[in-house]
Amino acid sequence: MIASDDEPGLMEDLEAWLDRIAPDSGDFKHQGRFESSSAVHFQSLLLHHQVVVPFSDGRIDLGPWQSILFVELDGLRPKVILVKVLGE
């Protein structure tokens, strides 16, 4: 997940950038147990697997153009989104 401006073309640019850095056809030494997901491992390192989102007065506190974007890198498995609230 990333907190970013959700501008037109952002997801397409992000996908192209990730494919250039860690392409599916990359010559990786490690391979997934059941199917090759090596590129996804490296792509997820670049995007992180969590986002910290500030709240003020009980409301989400992002910039005027920011959104929380869920980036799906490996559509083969079910996903769980876990939300933890810390603080007062």
Image (cartoon, rainbow, N blue to C red):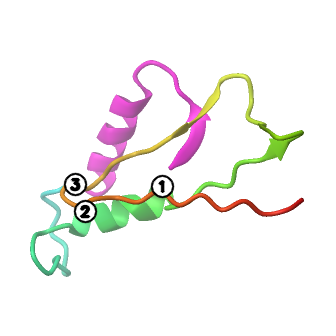
> Closer to the N terminus: mark 2 or mark 1?
2
> What residue sits right under mark 1 in the picture?
47
Tell me if residue 17 is in the magenta stretch: yes
Q: Tell me how far mark 3 sits from mark 2, CA to CA.
A: 6 Å
> What residue sits right under mark 3 in the picture?
23
Of helix, strand and loop, which one carries label 3? loop
Of helix, strand and loop, which one carries label 1? helix
Q: Are marks 2 and 1 in contact (CB under 8 Å)?
A: no
Q: Nearer the viewer, residue 60 or 3?
A: 60
Which residue is pictured at 35% across the width and 65% down the height? 42
Magenta stretch? 1-23
Of helix, strand and loop, which one carries label 2? helix
- Foreground mark, 1 or 3, reads 1
Disc marking residue 39: 2
Give the x, y percent position of residue 83: 60, 58
Q: Are marks 3 and 2 in contact (CB under 8 Å)?
A: yes
Q: Nearer the viewer, residue 59 or 31?
A: 59
Give the x, y percent position of residue 53: 70, 48
Q: Tell me how far mark 2 sits from mark 1, CA to CA.
A: 13 Å
- Judge from the rendering whether residue 56 lies leftward or rightward of residue 66; answer left or right: right
Residue type pointed to by label 1: Leu
- Judge from the rendering whether residue 61 lies leftward or rightward of residue 83; answer left or right: right
